[in-house]
Image (spheres, helix red, strand yellow):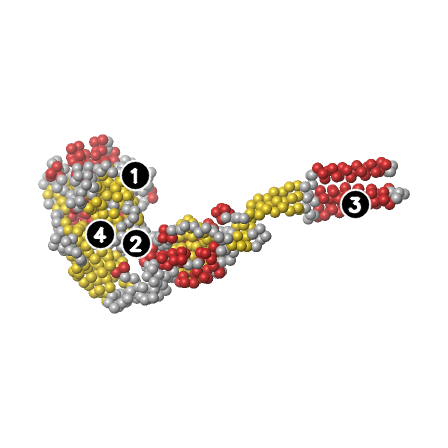
Amino acid sequence: MLNLLAQADPRTTSTTLEFDWPYTAGDWFLVALLLVASLFTIWMCYRDTRRMSRGWTIWLTSLRLLVLAALFVIALNPHLRSQSEAYRPSHVALLVDTSTSMQQPEMDPRDAAAANRSRTDAVRDLLEKSPLLDELRKQHVVDVYTFDSDLSGVRARFPTMFQPDLEGSASSVDAVDPEIDWQQVLESGGQATSLGDALDKLLAEIQSPTLSGVVVISDGAVNAGREVRVARERAEANGTRLIAVGVGSTTPPVNLTIAKVIIPTDVQKGDVFELAAILQAEGLSGKLAEVELLQKHPDEQEPTVVDRREVSIPEDAEPFEVQFERNPAEPGEYEYTLRARVADVAETRLEDNIVTRQVNIFDRPLRVLIVAGGPMRDYRFARTLLYRHPSMEVDLWLQSGEVGISQDANRVLYKFPDARDEFFQYDVLLAFDPDWSQLTQEQQDLLDEWVSDAGGGMVLVAGDVFTPQLAAAGQELATISKLYPVLLDEVGLRLGARDEATTAYPVGLTQEGEAAEFLKLSEGNEEDVWETFRGVYRCYPTRGVKAGTTIYAEFTDPLARGAGGQPVLIGAQRYGQGQILYIGSPEFWRLRAIKEEFLDRLWTKMVRKAAEGRSKRGLQRGLFILEGRDYDVGQTVPLRVRVVNSQFQPLDADEIEIEVYDPNGRPQVPAPRLLRDRHRPSEYTGDLRVALPGRYRLELQIPDSAETISEEVNAQLSRLEAASLVQNVRVLESLVGNTGGRYLTLAAAATEVPALLVNQGESTVIDEQIQEQWDRWWLLLTLATLLSLEWLSRKLLRLA
């Protein structure tokens, strides 16, 4: 509102003489007394001068009546009122949808006459190239807002060209056109469309008598927040006119979509692995879908079709799965592409029919060392399944065991390895609540070196026996404490107190946890395991996390919250070249209650995650460290790169630059710059916002080397935003309701919107001053003069 007042120009000032005329009964009583006094004065003057000439009678009567008249004027309180007024112009709000659904085609691609532009491009053309804004500015100030899951602030403001002159008529003047980068203003990327909430919030913020109306430009694909009815009711109560401009095709869609793919990132040579595609279709029930699997070896120029499936499409929107199995004979970085189509059908959208992923095939088994303070359940299940895994070799040290015990392992140890070459052969250390005090300081230093310099991975599982001892330990275990991603609490929930742990609390996945590949345990049509899993009863308390730690899941018991927030259930950090995972509860064995395979997948994926620094040990001088490979369009991808010089020491540079190529193969300009992590001098961090669906390629030229490291991330439309391929006209029509507005098509907006919005500008008093007039010196002098003349006259006429 203050900004609109700033445009209240020109100003006018008016001055008027006003009186306080009689209004109440008391006021009229005083007037009556004054009238009676006047009549009494006339009678008295006539009586006193009846023997004199008429001239003296008139003279004396006039003097007394003039005094009474002056007193009457004073009683009316004459005053000058000076008012300064400013014109508050009429204003219009444009509310534009910038959710990712606006990246979809404006028109059905099957229409040969349709322009090849997105909905966002269509809106940009409307605002930038059509006369809509110029026509609106003839009468109104125009503010542009955007929304997706929430309302933005004012993204652009256009001053009005309407100017009232001093006499109250209106004229138009030229106004300077503001420089607006429409591509930036309308950049889409929101993960949800909350039209009802955004519009309701806007109406609450801009409520004003000068608001002519709100124009909503959207495809109507509402998928979050409250119903649009809430905003419509507020508009009706405020008397605000709503106009909805629909964007997008209204033709029923015909489309086949690869909604999700499940492909491992790293596979041991010789392991048969599965590639699964989850597909959905609209308008194609009963037809045959052909799904092809293409494979590209690093030495090949073009991918080749290695497998093909045909499957009958079920009822609309019902997902179905297609699976492939592969077992490449040679190691390397393979590129797999899943491509789906329906023969002789023109689809509404084609870009969602193809998905490409990379799989690293390595030719050596992972060597895992399991250390356990005691035979807890998670230890027993993890030991057995990892030992039976064909691509893993498992040695173990059960600290509570005696010499000669039998365990499912390739080799049973009775102490921690002392020799560097003996210990450095392992890729992962899986520790179940171990008694770290049994390690000497030399062994602790060896462990630290193995993680930071050799890329060893650790999975640390907290327990109720030895973890509290570690939390309370002093300098004797400082090296071990440094390896933990979290700050363990010395006092808190006692894991062994069954009477205090009678309720299971769901696993609270964070945004990073939802995107993490190693926590995606469901395959095919299986329901999300984390939504089905009842949760865990206990979690070791933490008082915070260390710098660089990623929290994937939290313990959701509200009573367990401490000074550092909820206890960390799953967390991880990069430690030098190695990856360290922390598990805050020894109860993930409860996943077996849903399905045994879920627990198997969890431990297998965790070990693979921890072994990332070893499975890619060919990239010693540089390594991209990503939390996941699949992101929704509009999300920010956290980037972390470890890079060292030829002596494997941190670089001298405080920042590095990486090359990013978008799905169209164009380099991003300017290139992202990563800043040194002050806690880890050999690592650099930054972020990347993925604005387009498709594959992004990241590349880094290793300084003083011909070697280039690369990685890929995949961006896809949010499943919420991609669910509707057509404009939801019904929602937009219900939005305008009884507000006095209308639903309009995009083509009609430029001509019809200005005609629906009347000028609501008004003049407003911004300053007022009142100057009393009855206390002027000349008025008092006049009264004194009249009374003196009357007294003198009566004295001379001997009437006094």
Of residue 124 and residue 765, the one placed in the foreground of this image is 124
Q: What element carries label 3?
A: helix
Residue 6 place in picture, x, y as percent: 50, 46
Task: Find the residue positioned furthest to the front.
Answer: 174
Relative to 175, say whether 469 is above or below: above
Taking the spot 40% from the left edge, 56% from the top edge, the residue there is 128
Q: Earlier in the sequence, mark 1 or mark 2?
A: 1
- 3D distance between C-alphas at marks 3 and 4: 108 Å
Residue 286 lies in quadrant: bottom left
Taking the spot 59% from the left edge, 44% from the top edge, the residue there is 768
Of residue 145 and residue 541, the one placed in the foreground of this image is 145
Q: Which of marks 1 and 2 is in front?
A: 2
Side (left or right) of 372 relative to 544: left
Which residue, given by chain and number where applicable, does mark 1 sit on? 544
- 3D distance between C-alphas at marks 1 and 2: 36 Å
Would you say residue 593 is visible in this rendering? no
Q: Nearer the viewer, mark 3 or mark 1?
A: 3
Q: Which of marks 3 and 2 is nearer the N terminus?
A: 3
The crowding category of the residue bearing disc 1, from other C-alpha atoms within 10 Å (few below 14, some 14 to 19, many at least 20), is some
Q: Which of marks 1 and 4 is nearer the N terminus?
A: 1
Which residue, given by chain and number where applicable, does mark 4 sit on? 598
Amino acid type of the residue tagged 3 in the rendering: Ser
Which residue, given by chain and number where applicable, does mark 2 sit on? 692
- 3D distance between C-alphas at marks 3 and 2: 92 Å
Amino acid type of the residue tagged 4 in the rendering: Phe
Which residue, given by chain and number where applicable, does mark 3 sit on? 38
Amino acid type of the residue tagged 2 in the rendering: Leu
Q: Do the residues labelled 1 and 2 touch (CB within 8 Å)?
A: no
Q: Which of marks 3 and 4 is in front?
A: 3
Q: Is mark 1 on a helix, strand or loop?
A: strand
